Image: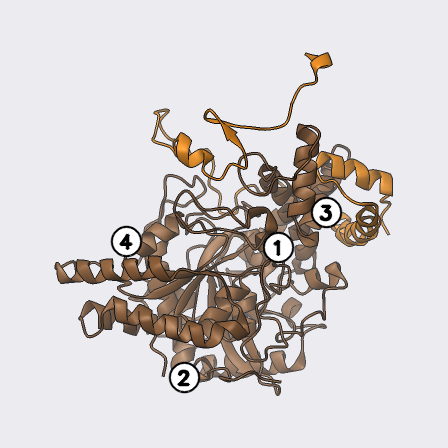
Chain colours: A orange, B brown
Amino acid sequence: MAEVTPQEVRHIATLARLKLSDAEVESFTRELAAILAYVDTLREVDVTCVEPTAHAVGAHNVFRDDAAQPSLGENMALANAPQRQNGFFRVPKVLDQDTV
Amino acid sequence: MLSTATQIAAQVQSRERSAVEVVRAAFAHIDARNSELDAFIAIEHEAARQQAAEVDRRIASGDSNLPLAGIPIALKDNICVHGMRTTCGSKILENFTAPYDAHVAKRLRDAGAVIVAKTNLDEFAMGSSTENSALAVTRNPWNTKHVPGGSSGGSAVAVAAGMVPAALGSDTGGSIRQPASFCGVVGLKPTYGRVSRYGLVAYGSSLDQIGPLTRTAEDAALILSVIAGADARDATCLDAQVPDYRATLGGPLAGVRIGIADEYFGEGLGEETRAAINSALAVLREQGAITADIHLPHTRYGIACYYLIATAEASSNLARYDGVHYGHRAAGATDIVDLYAASREEGFGAEVKRRIMLGTYALSSGYYDQYYARAMKVRTLLRRDFDQAFKQCDVICSPVAPTPAFAFGEKTADPLAMYLADVYTITANLAGIPALSVPCGFDPRGLPIGMQFMGRPLAEGLLLNLAHQYQQATEHHLRTPPAAAQH
């Protein structure tokens, strides 16, 4: 089994912004360890001098002119908002009083 | 006999039937069968009737450019249709109404098709059985105690049960082909970049493709001709011309080389599946095709490669679901970070969380080179395997899945076991090549078996022709599932 600890799982959950329960931390620790042990088989492959593949069929640097195009518009963009106010998405505080 | 999409379009174009009447008949089929099978997350009666009336108006006014005139079609619920709910089978988007049309939705509508429903799927297209949907349980019409496959299970069932003649699904690791195989219909994953992903909710952006599920290869060719092509809003879309895929149907198969890789026919393949494919190859040989031995030496690394790349991309793509702009927002969050974490915890199901965690891990500092970067290089080697093989053959034939459709709950205890069954379908997504599943038999329990053809980039015409010719010589695609519940 790959070395995956509950502490690592909690760290990953923080990075992924997932508020896992203790039971989930336990089950994910087991499951991730098994899956990572499986994907470790990739270590057998000799990848010396092999370029990574980003686009399967080789397209790259697809540009368009830097000209403004019509977009969704404010009303449509806010249409599914859980909370809105004055044309903004309303959220709980982002900055603490002390950190400003 | 159920009408095909091709037949319906001809009947509506010639005004033998009206689009409104066709849609009414489709809803009658849906009402008769859907309560047992639950293929749909939403059925759009009113929007469809209006669309059908519009099609009839256009035909009456002399518009003859409606290749999909009146065809009732269902779209997987990760494809945005303006004004319709697009849930991705998830609680986090349960009440999300799409504010715009996917490129493919607009193409279908412009061509005269009528979007009648959104189909059920594994949540965010993550799964191989549609059991991961948070919103509905879709059943295989051939045996309702068995899964329809996934993640496009709803689309496969909608077509297999005769509720619609055509549906769209999405395929990231096999999600069109495997449910097509489990449900006895044709499923096509086009070349990466052949069909615009604009409006397809992203799972693995370098792997995802939208494609048709139909009962006949001819219908798949018809749909693909309409939805394929360049789109400025998807920068990964190819700027290659779109042929009329129906024009090459019926061309001779003499000399077409079908590659058989022993990597696909080894241990783990069910005996009935092996036998069905061997019989199918005999039919194709009678039609002039030749089989050739090829090797795809990195095949056994495909699943590991996929489950690192797809999950890494998913962890990035699903970061947008944070309770701020749309979707589920947790109540009582203390600050913004708590809002994100709680909304996502409440809104995502277990498999989605599992893949986000795996992807985040593979990309995290200290692990990136060992996992994600390495997988990207193995991906190159998998692609080279195909490039080499296609020097000795024109198409590659393989199974789609190790067995026919399994029973509900049979594979849910062990996520890794579920992943391992993707072995035959996954490499086509990694290499970006087109791949098609066509029904080639049934097991003794009456469950469908499919076989897969893979081709060079942009070789959809050849794959469709092979499947079409095979269907002309066989009758598997004419068999229909039992009308009543099977116990």
Separation of residues labelled 4 and 3 (CA atoms) = 50 Å
User: Is the residue B370 above or below the residue A34 in the image?
Assistant: above
Separation of residues labelled 3 and 2 (CA atoms) = 45 Å
Dots 3, 2 in contact, CB < 8 A? no
Mark 3 or 2, closer to the camera: 2
Mark 2 or 1, closer to the camera: 1
Separation of residues labelled 2 and 4 (CA atoms) = 34 Å
User: Is the residue A57 above or below the residue A68 in the image?
Assistant: below
Which of B152 and B194 lies nearest the eye of the viewer?
B152
Q: Are marks 4 and 1 on the same chain?
A: yes
Reading the image, the residue beneath label 3 is A46
Which residue is painted at 17% across and 71% down in the image? B14
Could you tell me which chain the residue with mark 2 belongs to?
A: B
| Sequence-earlier tag: 2 or 4 | 4
Could you tell me which chain the residue with mark 3 belongs to?
A: A
In the rendering, which numbered label is found on residue B126? 1
Residue B373 visible in the displayed image: no
Separation of residues labelled 4 and 1 (CA atoms) = 30 Å
Return the x and y of residue B188 as percentages of the image width and height.
46, 63
Return the x and y of residue B70 as percentages of the image width and height.
28, 65
Return the x and y of residue A1 as percentages of the image width and height.
86, 52
Which residue is painted at 18% across and 59% down in the image? B57
Reading the image, the residue beneath label 2 is B473
Quarter of the figure with the N terminus of chain B:
bottom left
Quarter of the figure with the C terminus of chain B:
bottom right
Reading the image, the residue beneath label 4 is B110
Q: Is residue B34 left or right of residue B403?
A: left
